[in-house]
Image (cartoon, grey):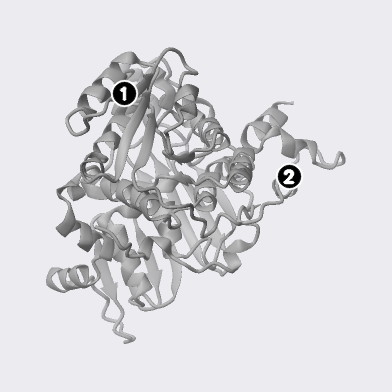
């Protein structure tokens, strides 16, 4: 029964009901069959999907803590240029709502409606008639329920990462987006970072040749944040590490890497295996600070390996326990070039076989590539908007700018619902593999096979507007 509860928490109860009775749930080798049984009859029709142009996008923001208040600032340029309007706020804490109203008043005359009466008042924001887009910036467990409710009430939704917790939630998000014909996007800001876009532009222009391998990560010492009650309300993020073990934060590394490999656009994930180290660093820090939780199941380092249908490999890592400099690794290996991030370094193969060793490009030559292959979106925004530098070095602004601009023009979004659930599904898949001695697990095809036919990299489009 304990194993059944564990599987239900990651896969969903409906998938368990479909399992042949002859298979023992305590048999870890039944897992691939269980995962295959989650398959739903999706169409993939949200690939390349667009709606009529929305000249001024009316936005409602749910969650005004650390992330929500930051993303609010990304709308200043869009509001001042009559491209968007923030029409509603919701948070369980009135003080956060008040601060956001005061901040918004600096660049928008019209006051937003506010919802903070209780934990369900956000539903009234979703039902507000003039809201076009619901922006979800709440704790992880609320992302899927809020996204589903938004779409079912006729709204487009944009959720912070991750968009889902379980495989069942992934399927439900895809089914609902296809049924309601509403955009459902997970806003992954690292896809819009200048370095990642520079690498992507080089790949698209043939600098790397054929890609064979890529690596991404979220290596970020979060102990000070997780062990402080005021940063993550009610210790919600720390609690994740008490009973779970896997990669809980896949998308900062996996989103850009998936774009490099054209995942969902000619290739897709085939299978994965995941392994966690022992836990030591977080518990040691927790005991020193007097935190309410001092024992954790999540290992200090999780490493997940993914194979794609076309034979490329991905290494994905997650460690928020260890004191270290921040890194997303951002490695991509091709037949003609290699890039390593943190710091950004580039190697160009001169098509020579030598035994004297190879060196990264010298700074002057690297700078030439950086300038020549600066992504067109970045080049354009550097001359268009002072807001370009806002939010994590600019990537937050670029992300919100692109989302609103796509809606303004009525064109497909850069990231679709299938991208969103695929990148998020690696979390429950990693937990299942870790708990089953790193067994290899087949990856569900959330696109209904559309990945074989779609080859458009939407994020590379130059949109016809300032």
- Nearer to the camera, 364 or 284: 364
The reply to whether residue 222 is in sight is no
- Nearer to the camera, 23 or 281: 23
Image-quadrant location for residue 381: bottom left
Disc 2: CA contacts within 10 A as few (<14), some (14-19) or many (>=20)? many
Image-quadrant location for residue 118: top left
Q: Count every numbered label the image shows and give the total.
A: 2
Q: What element carries label 2?
A: helix
- Nearer to the camera, 304 or 156: 156
Decide if residue 126 is on the left or right side of residue 361.
right
Q: What element carries label 1?
A: loop
- Residue 249, compared with residue 379, is above or below; it is above
Reading the image, the residue beneath label 1 is 231
Question: The N terminus lies in which quarter of the figure?
Answer: top right
Name the residue furthest bottom.
352
Q: Where is residue 334 in the image (x, y as percent from the top left)?
A: 40, 73
Q: Which mark is residue 383?
A: none
Image-quadrant location for residue 77: top left
Determine the residue positioned at 41% across, 38% down: 160
Determine the residue positioned at 15% across, 59% down: 383
Decide if residue 380 is on the left or right side of residue 351.
left
For the residues marked 2 and 1, what is the alpha-carbon distance in whole angstroms?
A: 38 Å
Determine the residue positioned at 47% across, 40% down: 157
Q: Which mark is residue 34?
A: 2
Q: Position of residue 400 (x, y in %)?
A: 32, 46
The reply to whether residue 54 is in sight is yes
Name the residue furthest left.
364
Decide if residue 183 is on the left or right side of residue 459.
right
Q: Where is residue 142 in the image (x, y as percent from the top left)?
A: 50, 28
Q: Position of residue 214 (x, y in %)?
A: 42, 62
């Amino acid at each position: 029964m304990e194993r059944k509860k564990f599987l239900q928490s990651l896969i969903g109860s409906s998938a368990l009901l479909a399992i042949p009775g002859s298979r023992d749930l305590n048999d870890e080798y039944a897992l691939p069959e269980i995962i295959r049984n989650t398959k739903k009859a999706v169409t993939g029709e949200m690939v390349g999907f667009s709606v009529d142009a929305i000249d001024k996008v009316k936005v409602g923001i749910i969650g005004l803590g650390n992330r929500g208040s930051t993303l609010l600032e990304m709308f200043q340029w869009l509001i001042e240029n009559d491209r968007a309007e923030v029409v509603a706020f919701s948070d369980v804490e009135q003080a956060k709502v008040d601060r956001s109203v005061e901040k918004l008043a600096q660049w928008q005359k019209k006051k937003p409606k506010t919802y903070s009466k209780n934990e369900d008042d956000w539903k009234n924001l979703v039902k507000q008639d003039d809201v076009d887009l619901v922006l979800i910036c709440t704790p992880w467990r609320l992302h899927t329920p809020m996204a589903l409710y938004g779409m079912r009430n006729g709204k487009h939704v944009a959720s912070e990462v991750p968009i889902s917790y379980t495989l069942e939630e992934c399927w439900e998000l895809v089914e609902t987006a296809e049924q309601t014909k509403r955009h459902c996007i997970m806003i992954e800001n690292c896809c819009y970072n200048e370095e990642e876009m520079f690498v992507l532009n080089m790949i698209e222009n043939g600098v790397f040749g054929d890609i064979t391998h890529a690596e991404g990560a979220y290596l970020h010492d979060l102990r000070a944040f997780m062990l402080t009650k005021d940063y993550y309300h009610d210790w919600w993020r720390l609690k994740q590490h008490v009973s779970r073990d896997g990669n809980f934060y896949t998308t900062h590394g996996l989103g850009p890497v998936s774009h490099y490999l054209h995942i969902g656009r000619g290739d897709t994930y085939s299978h994965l295996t995941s392994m966690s180290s022992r836990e030591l660093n977080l518990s040691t820090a927790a005991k020193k600070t007097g935190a309410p939780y001092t024992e954790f199941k999540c290992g200090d380092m999780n490493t997940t390996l993914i194979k794609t249908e076309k034979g490329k490999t991905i290494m994905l890592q997650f460690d928020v326990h260890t004191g270290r400099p921040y890194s997303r690794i951002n490695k991509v290996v091709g037949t003609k070039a290699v890039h390593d991030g943190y710091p950004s370094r580039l190697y160009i193969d001169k098509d020579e076989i030598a035994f004297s060793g190879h060196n990264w490009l010298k700074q002057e030559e690297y700078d030439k590539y950086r300038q020549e292959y600066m992504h067109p979106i970045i080049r354009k925004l550097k001359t268009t908007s002072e807001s370009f530098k806002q939010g994590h070095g600019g990537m937050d602004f670029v992300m919100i700018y692109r989302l609103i601009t796509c809606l303004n023009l009525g064109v497909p979004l850069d990231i679709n619902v299938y991208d969103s659930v695929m990148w998020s599904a690696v979390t429950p898949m990693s937990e299942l593999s870790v708990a089953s001695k790193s067994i290899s697990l087949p990856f569900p095809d959330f696109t209904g096979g559309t990945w074989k036919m779609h080859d458009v990299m939407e994020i590379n489009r130059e949109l016809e507007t300032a």
